[in-house]
Amino acid sequence: MASSLYVAIQERTATGILQKERRKIAILAGMNESRILPIGVQSFDDLRREGYLYVDKTALVYKLVAEGRQYFLSRPRRFGKSLLTTTFQAYFEGKNDLFKGLAIEKLETEWKAYPVLYLDFTGFNFNRPGTFEVAMDEHLETWEKSFGIEKESDLPESRFRKIIRSALEKTGKQVVLLVDEYDKPLLETEGEERERIRSTLKGFYGNLKSMGHCFRFAWLTGITKFAKVSIFSDLNQLKNLSMKREYATLCGITQAEMEATFGPEVDAMAAFQNLSREACLEKLRQQYDEYRFCEDEDIPGVYNPFSLINAFDDKKFKNYWFESGTPSLLLKALQNNLDQLRNLPAQDKLIVNSEVLTSAYEDNDNPLTLLFQSGYLTIKAYDAKYDEYTLDYPNDEVRYGFLKVLIPYVTQLADKDQTSLVINGMSRDLETGNTKSFMEKLQGLLADLPYHEGADAALKSESVFRNVVACIFLLSGKYVHTEKHTSQGRIDSVVETPEHVYLFEFKVDKPVEEALEQIERNGYAGDTRTVHKIGAVFSTKTRTLADWREVPG
């Protein structure tokens, strides 16, 4: 059986062939062959030698190398962490030819080569027992062969110590350790398997502190921080850059970088979509921008590079981040914290303190820690007086992707494609004012609300139904307020379309007349659009919509 490293090499070769084919197609189509998008390219070496478009981050790379020694960076999946890590690899291997024309060329004058130990967990599936041991052994064995070392122990931390000493002795240079996706073995395992891996990593990474004088540089990336791993408990010298303002744009693409690097691609996409350049830029911003990794408002948000580059390639505004596969992180968070996550769609503001954003995540912890660190929520505002952060979805791609994943969990519908068709139909109903058709579809969706122990008590709460309905409204692409305040009180939900406004009041096990009376009592400011006043009643006995009525606005 081919080793995982061999498979990774094959995949890299296949990617190179694919990119060359893209280049040929571009030439035949009369396009500028130098403007080839780096689809699937995660190696800085490959990217630069093949001449793909590149957003220059090397000034920040130089700053990190010049000012510190050991770092950790948390960023969402498919956010450029691997490309950045291989940029450090090329720099510390002294490959100055790859940096010609980039910002670092004017900053670095020595270009020293160091022994680089690159630990890459991205190409392994740790759901299979024993994979972690195979991954560690392959990397350690490769390093041992590089420095002519005979294996004398089965302990990874012991073998690693010997490799560090040998590299230092044979090259006369300190060692550089680069770790891509350090947390992947932990995110893909659980229970005793995770604890065993955690224990091994604790000993392995412990060398960073005990042998710190042997390291020129250490760089570790991941999606989230896991508790009880020594890099976050014992290794206090490891600087966490995840929310540092100076490096908030280290991964991702700012608006200025996007327009400077991909100007022709924006124009081509605008023409394909029959949009003005300004309208295209605004749509791109709404769909993929506004990830913020620090509280400073003067630091720009960034685009998801994976989605942005694929959008330019297809010239379509699709949900690439979520369509690349529902992340196991999100599924686990849903399974472990469904009651908390079910409330997210209906919350206008989500306010947390700094501990929620910076703490280490464990399965039963606050799910907002994981959702922020993994990119499903981002910083929208910060109150320095109270050290409070306002969180929200960064953009439409994440908002609608998250809600599509959430709907089957809160309704337990097995057929996700059928759910999407139903919600699309509901969207058309709202746009055309077909209240009857909309409410019939809503009744069908709510009939699938899951039953669980203690459900009777939960279903007596109007908030459960209101939050599920808010999720459906948002997926329908409509502007929805929950518990909207008026001069006389609050309206449960207000949904707006260009030509219609819907006022919903929800009751549980009560006459529908009470809901309609509350709408009239709370009042609603005049609107030039058609106003629909709808009272709806849910039954805890049938666990679905029992009755509803609409009165003229």
Image (spheres, rainbow, N blue to C red):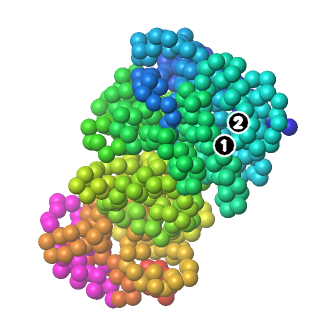
Q: Quadrant of residue 480?
A: bottom left
**Which stretch did the figure color magenta?**
511-537
Where is residue 379 drawn, in percent x and y? Answer: 35, 49
> Would you say residue 421 is visible in this rendering?
no
- Residue located at (47% from left, 49% from top): 373
- Residue located at (26% from left, 58% from top): 386
How dense is the environment of label 2, judged by Cα within 10 Å: few (below 14), some, or many (20 and up)?
some
Where is residue 46 drawn, in percent x and y? Answer: 60, 20
Q: On the rendered structure, is 389 left or right of 268?
A: left
Residue wearing tag 2:
160
Q: On the rendered structure, is 348 left or right of 337?
A: left
| CB within 8 Å, label 2 to label 1 | yes
Where is residue 303 drawn, in percent x and y? Answer: 41, 37
How dense is the environment of label 1, judged by Cα within 10 Å: few (below 14), some, or many (20 and up)?
some
Q: Quadrant of residue 91?
A: top right
Give SS at disc 2: helix
Where is residue 45 drawn, in percent x and y? Answer: 59, 20
Q: Is residue 82 above or below residue 433?
A: above
Give SS at disc 1: helix
- Residue located at (55% from left, 17% from top): 48
Q: Is residue 462 above or below residue 118?
A: below
Q: Quadrant of the N terminus?
A: top right
Q: Quadrant of the C terminus?
A: bottom left
Q: Amino acid at mark 2?
A: Phe
Q: Amino acid at mark 1?
A: Phe
Q: Is residue 221 above or below residue 527?
A: above
- Residue located at (36% from left, 22% from top): 260
Give whichever of 132, 398 is nearer the camera: 132
Q: Is residue 457 above or below residue 77?
A: below
Q: Magenta stretch containing residue 215, yes or no?
A: no
Q: Earlier in the sequence, mark 2 or mark 1?
A: 2
Q: Measure how far apart labels 2 and 1 are at the Cα level.
A: 7 Å
